[in-house]
């Protein structure tokens, strides 16, 4: 990495020898590791003060990987064999830390990317943080599908008398003992937080506004995800979905009786089309059946003391937890680039969404979790390595850019 002084801007100008990677989560680390395997250096810019900040700071204590570890490992380094099949969040973080140290990855922390843009005349990306301009021919977006908590606009929510927390700041149900809690959202987080609340003797009411697929995490001792992947080698997706739902209804019974209506589209097809992940049940369904987690209809409005529901019923609550998911933040900082949708996801669908053109890449925007991350990281690193080699072969390339910066 070289640097230069630009008189016209206060921020220091830094030439990055290799790609700039935005984000030190699993995706940023994975692509940095893959690049290093090709001998390509890189610089990771991370807004937080640590790696895997989502997992360290914005997830609840009881979180475990939803999928078996073999589907969640990053390229070139499996989980330690003594880790359980579903590692806890602390184990996952320690795996990430070992991964970073194994590949000698040292992100630049406290570097929030405020703006990034491509200059066609120089074919370079300029990435602005508070105190630096970073410049490189390659920009890898690894800032995550889950960069910012999503707060839905529920009428009346500002009038509520009690605490309102997004799951990103929820650690455990210990603060909610004996409290009536409205949990808005019935995805994996909504279900698991409701379960956690039950275990801390709170009284969760989970809002189920839409249809939802609930599948057992395992079927006959094998992970449901693993079964789906294996079946898909032999059968088309629709058949796989039919078989999964058949087995799910055998194991879980009819979830509609608990107020959990299934979508018409099957779970895997739905995931592929909309990104909506099926809930992998780890015990919440049993609590719903026993009445300890109460399923309630969509909220019409939040009142001072509770909520009014679409069926006209009104209930009082002590607290509200928003299990309403996250959003990408790419559109807030990546400028004049039409590769992303308004929601900050690549317009090109999986498996080709990693390559944006003009030296732009994305890792981890596949809605396929860490498996998608691994696939993007390998493809991106290979593609950059091919160009990197020819750039290095044309010796003048980096030198000319460096001079350009020095004379600007
Ligand atoms: C609760 C939860 C459980 C999950 N469980 C699983 C699972 O079991 N299996 C699975 O495969 N997937 C799971 N996922 C999905 C996904 O694999 C994870 O979200 C994973 O952390 C994604 O990694 P990432 O690096 O793409 O994004 P992140 O982990 O979100 O990392 C992105 C990084 O970019 C940084 N960043 C964002 N914006 C900027 C900016 N402007 N400037 C600088 N830095 C920035 C962030 O601070 C963050 O550190 C889960 C997701 C959640 C939310």
Image (tube, rainbow, N blue to C red):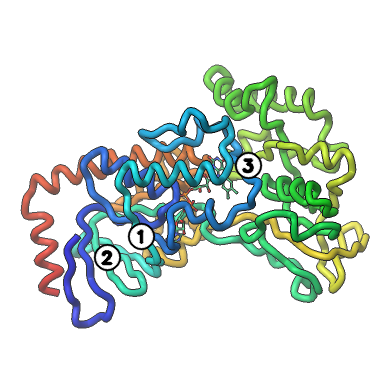
From the image, tell me which residue sits under label 3: 277
Q: Is mark 3 within 8 Å of ligand 1?
A: no
> x%, y% of residue 63?
63, 45
What residue lies at 73% left-to-right and 39% top-to-bottom?
263
Which callout, 3 or 2, points to the residue nearer the camera? Answer: 2
Q: What's the distance in space between the residues labelled 3 and 1, CA to CA?
A: 29 Å
From the image, tell me which residue sits under label 2: 134
Tell me where residue 141 sits by quadrant: bottom left
Residues at badges 3 and 2 in contact (C-beta under 8 Å)?
Answer: no
Label 1 Cα neighbours within 10 Å, binned few <14 / some 14-19 / many ≥20:
many
Q: Nearer the viewer, residue 19 or 284?
A: 284
Label 2 Cα neighbours within 10 Å, binned few <14 / some 14-19 / many ≥20:
many
> x%, y% of residue 6?
19, 77
Q: Is residue 208 visible?
A: no
From the image, tell me which residue sits under label 1: 45
What residue lies at 9% left-to-right and 59% top-to-bottom?
399
Image vertical order of residue 229 relative to residue 46, above or below: above
Q: Nearer the viewer, residue 39 or 386?
A: 39
Q: Is residue 228 left or right of residue 145?
A: right
Q: Nearer the viewer, residue 98 or 14?
A: 98
Residues at badges 1 and 2 in contact (C-beta under 8 Å)?
Answer: yes
What residue lies at 32% left-to-right and 49% top-to-bottom?
105
> x%, y% of residue 165?
69, 64
Q: What's the distance in space between the residues labelled 3 and 2, CA to CA?
A: 36 Å
Q: Is mark 1 within 8 Å of ligand 1?
A: yes
Locate the N terminus by quadrant. Answer: bottom left
């Amino acid at each position: 990495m070289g640097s230069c002084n630009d008189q016209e801007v206060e921020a220091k100008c830094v030439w990055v020898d290799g790609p700039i990677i935005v984000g030190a989560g699993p995706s940023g680390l994975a692509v940095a590791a893959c690049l290093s395997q090709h001998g390509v250096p890189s610089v990771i810019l991370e807004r937080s003060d640590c790696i895997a900040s989502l997992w360290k700071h914005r997830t609840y204590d009881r979180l475990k990987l939803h999928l078996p570890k073999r589907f969640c490992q990053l390229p070139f380094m499996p989980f330690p064999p003594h880790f359980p099949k579903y590692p806890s969040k602390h184990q996952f973080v320690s795996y990430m830390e070992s991964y970073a140290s194994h590949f000698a990855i040292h992100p630049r922390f406290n570097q929030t990317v405020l703006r990034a843009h491509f200059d066609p005349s120089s074919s370079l990306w300029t990435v602005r943080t508070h105190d630096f301009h970073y410049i490189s021919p390659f920009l890898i977006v690894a800032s995550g599908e889950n960069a910012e908590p999503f707060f839905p606009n529920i009428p009346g929510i500002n009038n509520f008398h009690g605490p309102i927390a997004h799951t990103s700041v929820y650690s455990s149900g210990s603060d909610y003992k004996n409290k009536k809690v409205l949990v808005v959202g019935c995805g994996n987080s909504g279900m698991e937080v409701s379960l956690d609340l039950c275990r801390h003797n709170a009284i969760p009411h989970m809002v189920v506004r839409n249809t939802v697929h609930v599948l057992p995490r395992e079927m006959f001792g094998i992970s449901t995800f693993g079964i789906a992947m294996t079946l898909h080698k032999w059968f088309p997706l629709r058949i796989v979905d039919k078989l999964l739902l058949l087995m799910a209804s055998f194991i879980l019974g009819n979830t509609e009786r608990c107020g959990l209506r299934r979508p018409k589209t099957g779970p895997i097809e739905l995931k592929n089309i909309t990104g909506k992940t099926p809930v992998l049940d780890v015990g919440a369904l049993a609590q719903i059946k026993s009445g300890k987690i109460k399923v309630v209809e969509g909220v019409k409005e939040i009142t001072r003391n509770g909520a009014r529901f679409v069926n006209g019923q009104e209930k009082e609550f002590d607290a509200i937890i928003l299990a309403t998911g996250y959003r990408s933040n790419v559109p807030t900082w990546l400028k004049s680039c039409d590769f992303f949708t308004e929601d900050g996801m690549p317009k090109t669908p999986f498996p080709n969404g990693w390559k944006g053109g003009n030296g732009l890449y994305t890792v981890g925007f596949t809605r396929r979790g860490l498996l998608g991350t691994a696939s993007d990281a390998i493809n991106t690193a290979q593609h950059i390595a091919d160009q990197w080699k020819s750039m290095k072969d044309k010796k003048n390339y980096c030198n000319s850019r460096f001079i350009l910066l020095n004379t600007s």
